[in-house]
Image: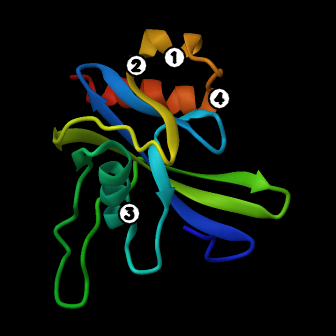
Amino acid sequence: MAHIHEKIDFTVAVFIVQNGRVLLVRHRKLNKWLPIGGHIELDEDPEQAALREAKEESSFDVELVGERPPTTERGTRALIAPRFLDIHRIHETHEHIGMIYWARPRNGEMTLASAEHHDICWRGADELDSLEPPMSGAVKWYCRKAIEEIGQ
C-alpha cells in the first residue's frame, strides 16, 4: 500500500508463534528478516490489519493474543491492544508507528507470498542469531519475547 501521509504511517507487526517457534519472512524489497506485517489501510482498524496481513503474507488465519475489554456498545468496538508500540524511521523524512501483536495460527498452510518475500520460515529463539542476512536486535528481542510469552 502507498503511504497515506508523507511524514508518518501506522503499521502492524504480527509475531506468529507455534511450538516455541516464530514465523519470519525475508522481505523482498528490504532484504531483512521480519515478522508478518504492513501498513494499516484507511478502511481498517489495527486488529483488522493484523489479521489481513497474516492471511496475505502467510495464508494463516490467526488468533491475536491479548485481552479485549468488555466495553463494546453501540458506536464503540473494543479492540485487542497491541503487546508493544514503537516508532521507527523508514528514511530521513518518514516514520512508522508500529503496533506489535502476538498471534497463534488457527488454520491454514504456510505459503510464501513470493511477490513480497524471498523466504518464509519458522525459527526458535536459539536460531535467530544464525539468520542471514542478520536480523536487527529489536526484531530479535520481539521474537524472543513472543516465544517466551506464548510458548507452545
x and y, in percent, of residue 141 in the image: 54, 27
In the figure, residue 121 lies in which quadrant?
top left
Q: Is residue 7 left or right of residue 47?
A: right
The reply to whether callout 2 and callout 1 are in contact (CB within 8 Å) is yes
Q: CA distance from mark 2 to mark 1?
A: 7 Å
Task: Find disc 2 in the rendering and name its residue.
Answer: 123
Q: Residues within 10 Å of mark 1 (few under 14, many from 20)?
A: many
The reply to whether callout 1 and callout 3 are in contact (CB within 8 Å) is no
Name the residue at the front extreme.
115
x and y, in percent, of residue 44 in the image: 37, 75
Name which residue type carries label 4: Ser
In the image, what residue occupies the spot 33% across and 42% down? 58
The mark nearer the N terminus, 2 or 1, is 2
The mark nearer the N terminus, 4 or 3, is 3
Name which residue type carries label 3: Ala
Q: CA distance from mark 4 to mark 1?
A: 10 Å
Q: Which mark is residue 136?
A: 4
